[in-house]
Amino acid sequence: MQDGIDGDLYRKVLGRYPTGVTLVTGMGDGEPLAMVIGSFVSVSMDPPLVGFLPGRNSYTWPRIAASGSFCINVLSDAQEDLSNAFFRKDGDPWEGTGWVPAASGSPAIPSCLASIDCSIHEVVDAGDHLFVMGLITGLSHVDEGSPLVFLGGRYGQYRPMA
């Protein structure tokens, strides 16, 4: 950690900022792969780019990257169990997800709030993470639901202000 910045304090401070919960999916060696990501971000409308930050030591990301594409699935506040199934990696988290292949072949999960199919545009070194930018090649969404939110080590939900 940078001189003067305490790691525990860093986590506490940044843990005060809520993030949406996504499932980044792809195919590797003919099997569906996924990782839970809270660092999803819109990057650009022209060209249409989105991004996320997998850990540099991720086991799953290099396998997804080899395919050249990925799909961001935005989880709803009713999908905490789905998030946990992929985060814990016990059993087969794909069982019962009902995924379908997006145009790229990456798994899209129709029960999610949105799916964003991408080809890998650029991968940039970002310290102990990588910043992956994807060129959007396809979009789908449902009209109802609320996103799953993560704040201070716990799941929550979005509620609009009156």
Image (spheres, helix red, strand yellow):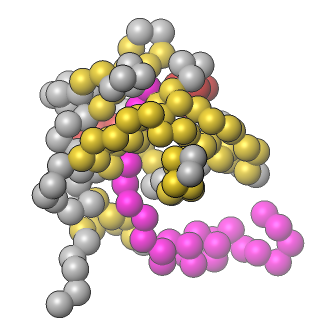
- Provide residue 29's location: percent of width, then percent of height: 47, 9
Residues in magenta? 1-26
- Magenta stretch: residue 86 in it? no
Identify the residue at the far top of this view: 30
Identify the residue at the far front of this view: 46
The residue positioned 24% from the left and 24% from the top of the image is: 100
- Magenta stretch: residue 9 in it? yes
Q: Is residue 93 above or below residue 17?
A: above
Residue 95 visible in the shown view: yes
Residue 84 visible in the shown view: no
The residue positioned 20% from the left and 36% from the top of the image is: 110
Quarter holding the N terminus is bottom right
Q: Is residue 66 above or below residue 113?
A: above
Q: Is residue 35 above or below residue 45?
A: above
The residue positioned 38% from the left and 60% from the top of the image is: 20
Q: Is residue 110 above or below residue 102?
A: below
The residue positioned 17% from the left and 27% from the top of the image is: 98
